[in-house]
Image (tube, grey):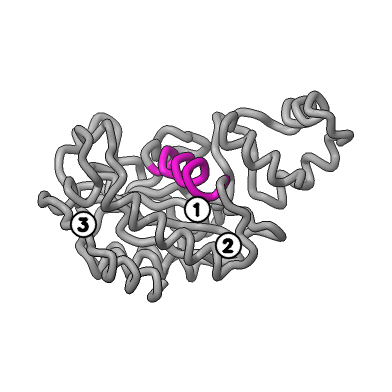
Amino acid sequence: MMMKLIDEQYTLRPFYGVPRMTAWLRREGHLVNPKKVRRLMRLMGLEAIYPKPRLSQSCPGHKRYPYLLKGLVIDHSDQVWCSDITYIRLLHGFVYLTVVMDWFSRYVLSWELSITLDKEFCLKALEKALSVSKPEIFNTDQGSQFTSEEFTGRLEDAGVRISMDGKGRLYDNIFVERLWRTVKYEEVYLHDYLSVSEARERLALYFHFYNSERLHKSLGYQTPYEVYFNEPYIVMQDAQKAALEQRV
């Protein structure tokens, strides 16, 4: 219950560190001390910086790449892709979610869930995305999953330029940060997932909705699918929707 409250408040106020989060919880009527709040935030991978959830910890031995997006005009699909990791709560426990998203269209090319922060689920999401298309630039933070030789090597083999956020700089990857807030407020916080499989099923349906039906004001009230593929989305008939739900 306490992690649920912290998750919601952190998503709304990501600049809340341990002292401020403790004070807020106490104002809400919960008898907690900073030690407990610090332990829970560390378990969830949350740290108030300027501000960024630190689910991707850096690895000293891995190569870093410069940030390539400063001042860059992003004006077409597959120009820049990005990826990140966030915490997804379950009724009892939690999992981690990663996505690969196109910056220009906000189209989610792939996503994966994992019960650990190992690099494998990020690599799996990358492979799925590359089976759809290929970007000119791929942007991530400096987490060990994304700086691993397997991840960067796969991008280099595909001829993709690698860009990495400055350490502790939230807004270098702003569009995926906005996606996390959208996913949590429109899907995750409305349901108490009982299991990893239920979370996977619900998120599959949500990302289908997000890509093909959710209208974005910043896209001129078009969907990410319409902008990414530059064509209208044909709404599925009830039988097709039922088949999709059965598959997921």
What residue lies at 42% left-to-right and 33% top-to-bottom?
Answer: 171
Which label sits on residue 154? Answer: none
User: Mark 1 or mark 3: which is in front?
Assistant: 3
Observer able to see residue 199: yes
User: Mark 2 or mark 3: which is in front?
Assistant: 3
In the rendered image, which residue does mark 3 sit on? 235
Q: Earlier in the sequence, mark 1 or mark 2?
A: 1
Q: Relative to 185, is 43 on the left or the right?
A: right
In the rendered image, which residue does mark 1 sit on? 85
Q: Report x, y in % for residue 220.
A: 20, 32
The kind of residue tagged 1 is: Ile
Magenta stretch, residue numbers: 176-189
Furthest residue toward left? 231
Q: Report x, y in % for residue 64.
A: 42, 50
Nearest the eye: 224 or 237: 237
The kind of residue tagged 3 is: Val
Q: Relative to 1, is 184 on the left or the right?
A: left
What residue lies at 39% left-to-right and 36% top-to-bottom?
Answer: 174
Q: Is residue 202 magenta?
A: no
Q: Relative to 146, is 229 on the left or the right?
A: left
In the rendered image, which residue does mark 2 sit on? 117
Check whether the beta carbons of the residues at disc 1 and disc 2 lie within 8 A of each other: yes
What residue lies at 35% left-to-right and 64% top-to-bottom?
Answer: 126
Instruction: Find numbered disc 1 in the image and state the secondary structure of the residue it sits on.
Output: strand
Q: Report x, y in % for residue 23.
A: 79, 25
Q: Relative to 12, is 112 on the left or the right?
A: left
